[in-house]
Image (cartoon, rainbow, N blue to C red):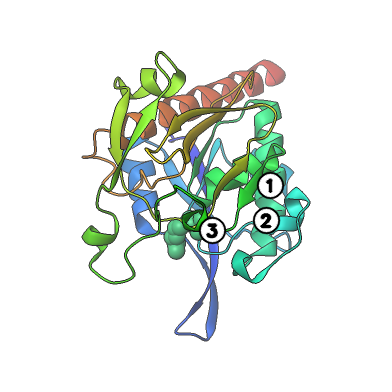
Amino acid sequence: MARPIVGIIGNAYLMNDQYPVHAAGTMNSTAVTDVAGCMPLIIPSDPRFVSVPELMDACDGFLFTGGRPNVHPEEYGEAATEAHGEFDRARDEVALELIRSCVEAGQPILGICRGFQEVNVAMGGSLYPEIRDLPGRDNHRMPPDGTLEEKFALRHEVTFQEGGVFHQVMGAQKVLTNTLHGQGIKTAGPRLVIDGHAPDGTPEAIYVSDAPGFTLAVQWHPEYNAAEDPVSRPLFEAFGQAVLAWSNGKQATTLLKSA
Ligand SMILES: N[C@@H](CCC(=O)NCCCC(=O)O)C(=O)O
């Protein structure tokens, strides 16, 4: 039987500082394949190449990946400053509309890091440009040097609401995660539930309340070591089950229409 398809939101890069590509970390494809049990498909996240209806038709669920460029603050009604850094307006345009459409339709989404921030902005929330500059907050950025293992090392706890969605998915109320981000949620979108926090109060785990489908998003990077990590594994397994259920529902509808 054909596997359900997970669209992986790609980022724009210049290969060898010269050759433009769309790409996503291989660890995203590994997590989608080995843990979620789906087929990964990297999306060129630019409205010149893809439209939201086409993507929703082609894929069963979407992984909104991490990415260095920040969501443009105009998307939440603020002016860009130097602290906001680099942007990717093409990804903003595809991702934000795709999130809103998936939330409405009940099509599964999983947000990671920049993807987590996109879910908040798409649902009407805003972001701090640099959380380490806020009083009482820690530096959540990755170490500038070191191996991949050092960059993705587990660095802080996340505590979930007792009995909440993440507590149920993880089977634990406190977990250990990596952390590789500069921005963070300032105001949560009206329908967003902040279900987990870092020790310094930074929101780390969210979902959209009353959404008909899977809408979980995390500020850390569960794609790293997803098959082995006790936090990543249940998250990608739950996402895979939701994507499979969506795919089965789509096939049942197609069969009904052709009967
Ligand atoms: N730009 C945002 C999001 C950070 C993020 O997603 N980091 C991972 C980058 C991985 C990559 O380069 O592909 C922020 O800084 O908060």
Is disc 3 surrounded by few (<14), some (14 to 19) or many (20+) residues within 10 Å? some
Query: Splitting the image into 4 quarters, where does residue 238 fall?
Result: top left
In the picture of the structure, the residue carrying the numbered disc 3 is 130
For the N terminus, the quadrant is top left
Question: Callout 2, which amino acid?
Answer: Asp
**Res. 92 mark:** 2
Residue 145, percent from left and from top: 28, 72
Task: Please say whether residue 45 is visible from this viewpoint.
Answer: yes
Question: Callout 3, which amino acid?
Answer: Glu
Query: Splitting the image into 4 quarters, where does residue 85 fall?
Result: bottom right
Q: Residue at x 36, y 60 (%)?
A: 142
Residue 240, percent from left and from top: 42, 31
Dot in front, 3 or 1: 3
Q: Residue at x 40, y 56 (%)?
A: 139
Query: Splitting the image into 4 quarters, where does residue 239 fall?
Result: top left
| Tags 1 and 2 touching, CB below 8 Å | yes
Question: Callout 1, which amino acid?
Answer: Leu
Q: Secondary structure at mark 3?
A: loop
Residue 109, percent from left and from top: 55, 36
Give the spatial CA distance, label 3 vs label 2: 19 Å
Dot in front, 3 or 2: 3
Q: Residue at x 46, y 44 (%)?
A: 219
Give the spatial CA distance, label 3 vs label 1: 21 Å
In the picture of the structure, the residue carrying the numbered disc 1 is 96
Is disc 1 surrounded by few (<14), some (14 to 19) or many (20+) residues within 10 Å? many
Is disc 2 surrounded by few (<14), some (14 to 19) or many (20+) residues within 10 Å? many
